[in-house]
Image: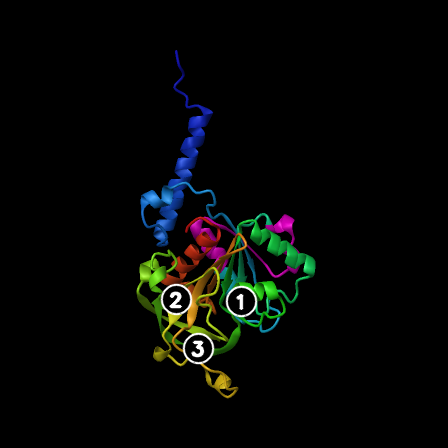
Amino acid sequence: MKSSKPSSISRRKHSKSTAAEARYKANLENGAAESTKAALKPTRHALESVLVYSKPAWYAHATTSATNHWFFHFGWDNGVNIDQTDDPLKFNLDDLSRYQVLVLNSTTNFGEDLTQEQREALMTWFRQGRGIVAVHAAAVHHGVWDWYASLVGCDFVADSDRMPARLVVDPAATEHPAVKRHAPELWINEEWLCFDRAVTGQPGVNVLLRLDESTFQPVRDKFLEMNAKPMGADHPAAWTRETEGGRFFYTAIGHDCRVLNTEFGRRHMLEALRWAAFETE
């Protein structure tokens, strides 16, 4: 007589199914799942582990500790392990290999404190099919390291006061999950950055969001006195780049927790991380 006790194989299948269902429900509550079918679809690179690095080498945002804390809670809410550090010693292949994605949390002049060996470890890790998500000031004053500067594709010249602005989803990016739900446009209240050039058309770059400068003052008085200029009609605020086997995602939001903690901010960041982990296209 055959035993009715489930085999170890069936128990493992049930465990995987239960885990996938639980993950779907958790993501659905945070506005991350388009459908049950999509959420339960197996992926080789499901987002599981992220390292948040937040040490600035130039200007330190007073809000960085709060945004670090936001990432911890965000990980708990979405079933993702989030570790945080401001120690450059983490940039070795042994430690980096534990993570699929590196978040650079307003790391002004990223790379200045890294040794050549640490830089090479990060480049090797990235080229192994990993992802970097750069948040807000992670695109500020990074000329000390050519590789990272070319990855970002532009540099900071000015910022605005915190104010609402109209963002337009690029017509070619309306299906990207980081902006899909909010196409064709949305309004966000944030401190906005101006760059020395637009990344539009650079190799491997897809612009997701552009700022409509007619809806806000893009350069605050301090920088106007320094003769800083607005960017004009092409003012990217979020973009992706695929290069060297890895993925890079930049978003201008995240100066503090206020936008991150909105429905748009939570979804935008989750989908940025999922994309950088090669979980989504």
Tag 1: amino acid: Ala
> Foreground residue, 223 or 191?
223
Image location of residue 57, percent across then percent down = 62, 69
Spatial CA distance of label 3 from label 1 is: 19 Å
Tag 3: amino acid: Met
Which residue sits at x=52%, y=86%?
Answer: 226
Per the rendering, the mark at residue 138 is 1
Spatial CA distance of label 1 from label 2 is: 17 Å
Which residue sits at x=58%, y=74%?
Answer: 59
Q: What stretch is highlighted in magenta?
A: 71-96
The residue identified by callout 3 is 231
Q: Count residues near mark 3 (Cα–Cα under 10 Å), then give few for <14, some for 14-19, many for 20+.
A: many
- Secondary structure beneath dot 2 equals strand
Name the front one of labels 3 and 1: 3
User: How many numbered marks appear?
Assistant: 3
Q: Does the magenta stretch include residue 124?
A: no
Q: Give left or right: position of 136 versus 33.
A: right
Per the rendering, the mark at residue 208 is none
* Residues tagged 1 and 2 counted as in contact (Cβ below 8 A): no
Q: Count residues near mark 1 (Cα–Cα under 10 Å), then give few for <14, some for 14-19, many for 20+.
A: many
> Foreground residue, 17 or 156?
156
